[in-house]
Amino acid sequence: MTTATFDMPVGAQKSFGTAGVAVALLLPIALVNAIGFILPVLNLARMSFNEALPGGGIAEALTAANWTGLLHDSFYIELITNSIVVSLGITLATLLVSYPIALYLHRASGAWRTFLTVLVISPLLTSAVVRTYGWIALLAEQGPVANVIASMGFQPPRMMFNTTGVVIGLTEILMPYMILSLMAGFGRLDPKVEEAARTLGATPFRTFWRVILPLTLPGIALGCLLCFVLAISSFITPKLMGGGRVFLLATEIYDQAIVTLNWPLAATLSMLVLIIFGAALAVYSRILRMIEG
Amino acid sequence: MEENPTSWFMRVTVTILFLFLLAPVLLVFPISFSGDQILAFPPSSWSLQWYEALLGNTVMMSAFLTSLGLATVVTVLSLIIAIPASYAIVRLKVTGSEFLFNLFTAPLLLPTIVLGLAILIIFASMGLLATFTGLVIGHLVITLPYALRVLSVSLGNLNLACEEAAASLGAKPLAVFGKVTLPMMAPGIVAATALCFLVSFDEVVITLFLTGPRMTTLPVELFHHVESQADPLVASVSVLLILMTLAVVMIVDRTMGLTKAFMK
């Protein structure tokens, strides 16, 4: 071994050794990546062209039947449009409730800012199941929210096991992502610019509309992209708060995979979610170019 | 800050929105001390009955132990696999290391519902469903990207001078790594440990696809429980989950604080 080292030119020996060592170091992670990510995803794409047999069987095939079936079935067309519309609604609601917090945090400083940022991040560390459970308790028929509405003299609406509940729950669950994205994009918002607008006589509303909002558009675009893709692929909250009455893409994927055992259809719906992801990303980069340019 | 109606309005709005953000998590604490048989807020009486019920619930307790064991194994494996990988990518700068980094962190870009289904179909043919091994691999798919990211940042921020000094004084590469690089990576390793543990311990969607009646984790059992009946038992489990997360975060804060103090 030592003699060999002497015989070899130093550079060659080093590069050869480095490559060998690198392969050895990267092998375990590459294996997990191959078994748990690449192989399953390729297989999923392939599965969407297989044929589903009654009773959960699968026939190896190369048919577009799952795809064309989706587009001819009014249930699925409604499911897909419903998912997109509900996710857009959740994104808008999340933006509206997150923007004031992000703006406030952007202006805060020191320990107060750190404390509030921790408050914003802390729900992210709590399981979605736990937070959804909290919402079930809040929005139940005789729950605190219904009681407050009733005490004001109104008839409390049904907020559980329907789309309203899902929208409220998901809006709150996605808030931390939106707030953090908005704050990341608020870098260009210099308090001096606002001050200048105010000293030049702009009303607070005008300052917001003409100065603050345009400067924060990139952050808004990023937050909306993130919340939309998270909303359309979220499963726990629609499943638990929808009570089997709200049909969205993610819950349908799960039901087809676990209950109906129609894996080709579940795979097709999964691929559709990825296509919607791609479309959202394309819209985002287009909007971003419009803002920047 | 100047006192004007706008800032007063802003403060009230922000307070209300913070209450909205924190309400569901905060609500779980009083409910866990409910004396009622059903989920109601505010509870009509207070008791510890739901904590007693939790200790007596063999399904929940065994799911808790599974989760604990699973998160521990997954965390240890994540470090063993990701530390060498981050070294190869950051220090050895192999050809296409940027591509490899993106490839190995790509699973985080996929929605868990899609990844879960994809893994379910492959694991079904391998006989890995509802097995501990299957759960470990399934969790590694999402903990490794986090570990690789945190460790690569940590390694990239290290000053090369110490390693070069050790090497020029005649230390073998492995000795340099073990005696210089690894100790200097300690804060990153602690952060990666905490992150992997929490991600694995809290994972629901992918795990839902891979568990079965024989092998289940605490978040999955909690999910099934809420699905069938929303009683205060879920609240007591939730409080334990939250306290556990808090403990991990505080341990990290302590250790990281200590490490930084030690290094200075």
Image: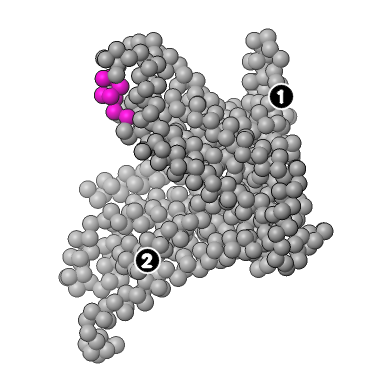
Marks 1 and 2 belong to one chain: no
Q: Which residues are magenta?
A: A189-196
Say whether residue B236 is visible: no
Is residue A259 placed above or below B37 in the rendered structure?
below
Q: Amino acid at mark 2?
A: Gly
Secondary-structure class at tag 2 = loop
Question: Who's the residue at 47% across and 67% down the image?
Answer: A30
Q: Position of residue A95 (x, y in %)?
A: 49, 30
Question: Who's the residue at 62% across and 35% down the image?
Answer: A85
Q: Alpha-carbon neighbours of circle 1 within 10 Å: few (<14), some, or many (≥20)?
A: some
Q: Position of residue A32 (x, y in %)?
A: 52, 65
Q: Is residue B228 left or right of residue A180?
A: right
Q: Position of residue B54 (x, y in %)?
A: 66, 40
| Spatial CA span between label 1 and label 2 | 55 Å
Residue linked to disc 2: B96
Secondary-structure class at tag 1 = loop
Is residue B67 placed above or below A131 in the rendered structure?
below
